[in-house]
Structures are given as C-alpha cells and as structure tokens.
Image (cartoon, helix red, strand yellow):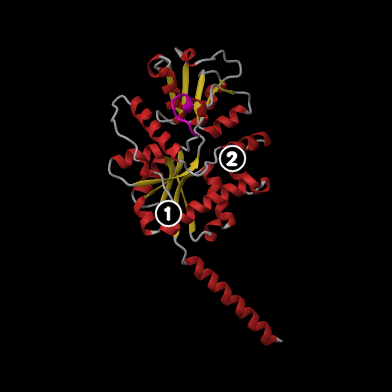
Amino acid sequence: MKLVVMRYFVLLLVLFSVQVSAASQLPVVRVAVLQSGTVNWELQYILNQQIDRAHGFKLEMQKMASLSAAKLALTSGGADLVVSDWLWAGKRNNAGANLRFIPFSSQIGSVLLPPDSKITSLTDLRGKKIGVAGGPMNKSWVLLQAAAKAQGVDLRQEAEIQFGAPPLLSQALRRGQVDLLATFWHYGARLETEGYKPMVSMQQLMHDLGMKSGLPILGYLFNADFAQRSPTAVAGFAAAITEAKQRLAADDAEWAEIRPLMNAESEEIFQALKAGYLQGTPGVLSEQQVDDAQVFYRLIDSLDPNPSGEQLDPAVFYRNTL
C-alpha cells in the first residue's frame, strides 16, 4: 500500500513539474499600464482566469505612474505593449517608428453639463468656461472643437479653457467653476449618476464630421518587429482580450472579481462603469473604420496651429494573418 501511495505522489510531482516547465516556456507579453484604469480590469481578469496561458503566452502587467512613462517603456523596449490611441501611433510612424494597434475600446469620452444648464447648442459655448481633462489632445475636446468650428465658433479663442486632472475638473464642475466638462468616459459615467447630463454624443459628433462608423480610438500599441519576432504571442494576446470581453459581456457573475479594481462607491456607479465598458467593446475592425480613422487623423491635423499635412498609414491597424 505504501508503495502505491508513493508512486501516486511521484506521478503527481512529475505532472506538476511538467506543467510548471511548460508554463515557464511560454513567451512573456509585457504590457505597461497605469496604476489604475479600465485596462487594468481587462488584463487582471485575463490573469485571474489564466486566459493568457490558454492562448499560449504569459501576461505580465507593468504598473506605471503616468502615460508618458508607459509610452517610454514601449519605445525604449522595456515593455511590449501599451494602451494609447492610434493618433499618437500614426504620428510616431510618420516620424519613422513602426507601431501597430489592436483595438481596446471605442469609448471616446464625455462632454457634460450641470443639470440646470441652459446651454443647448455649440454656439452657446461662446464666452463659457470649459474644463478639459488631461490636455489639449483629449479626444472629446478635439471633436467638440471641430464641431464648433464647423458652426463658426473657435472655442480656443472664444471660450475660457481650463486643462487639468480629471478628478479635479469633476470637482470644478460640481462647484460651478466650469460650465462644461470634456472628460474621460469613466469619470463621465460617475458624474451622470449624479445628474450631470451629456451635451452631445461623441459618436454623433463623429458622424456629423463625416465619420460613418463607431471608431475604436484606444488600443494596445506594439512595435511591428515584436510581431515579427513573436507572431503567435501577438495573435494569442489579441485572441485573449477578445475572449475576456466576450466572457464579461456574457455573464454578470464574471464581474465579481473585477469589481474591487473599479473603486465603485455604489451599486449605481458600478453598473454605470460596467455598462460603459461593455458599450465600448469594439468589433472586428472594418474597412469603413479604417477609412474613418484617416478622416479623423486629417481632422486632428487641421486643428493644429501648424498642420503637417501628413496622412495616417492604415498599416498601423493590426490584422492577424496567422
């Protein structure tokens, strides 16, 4: 009997050693991410569920203090991927880089008004105080500028603009220190639960400006040579994030392990954040979306004080050919 038990434990040890060895041989995919944010929800879920290993790679999250630090990690070779927008990638590529983009979210941002605001049109923004979260390249702010310009309003000249960190500007809106706030979608979702109202849909603005599809702006960026060195790892990563999104969309119970990362102060805020994440889930990238991206790129360039006239190379969008 003792011999049988010993053989059983030896067999378990061998099987465990084989599994550990197999896992250690998986290619590592390093993603530089901010300390908090919606991408953490997705990547931590992949780690918790071992979706990465099921798709033939080992995910490693590298927490960064700022987006600029995350981008530096990518460009210096300290990370394999970073979440940013294809607009930045397009500019980098026009300067000699060779970045590729896998869609993460089609959420662009929110443009919010106080519940009692009398603002009803873009022309009403003349002389108003506008808060812009992050900086001049905030995508909802860029779209708002372009839409206002089409109606003869130059918001940079005819309104008072205040840039700042999203939490600080949320407080400024609550205190009445700004009349309008262009902010990131998850901050907007929180404000909407308090009664603040969207002035206009970002997707509607894009449509009015000539873009016909729901365009994913944020995504995972990586160098093309990484895909050349590790094509199965990149394809596996793309498949893993797709599977994670599908699972989270299919079963509310899957959100239980993500909820602590969301810092949702109430059930209402949790549901708003969950709905916003799912609403931004991108589908398979279409040719129309690629065309719209080129329109958006030209639009961004036209708003620059010194337009470059450069075009977006559609090769920036990753297409899995495996």
- In the rendered view, does 1 fall on the left or right side of 86? right
According to the picture, the residue beneath numbered tag 2 turns out to be 278
Q: Residues within 10 Å of mark 2 (few under 14, many from 20)?
A: some
Magenta-tinted stretch = 206-213
Q: Is residue 169 above or below residue 79?
A: above
Under circle 1, the secondary element is loop
- Three-letter amino acid code at the position of disc 2: Leu
Residue 281: percent from left, percent from top: 55, 41
> Going 63% across and 49% down the picture, which residue do you hit?
257
* Residue 76 visible in this rendered orientation of the protein: yes
Where's the C terminus, which quadrant?
Answer: bottom left
Q: Residue furthest right?
A: 1
Question: How would you classify the magenta stretch by its main secondary structure?
Answer: loop
Query: Which mark's residue is nearer the viewer, 1 or 2?
Result: 1
Residue 41: percent from left, percent from top: 56, 46
According to the picture, the residue beneath numbered tag 1 turns out to be 321
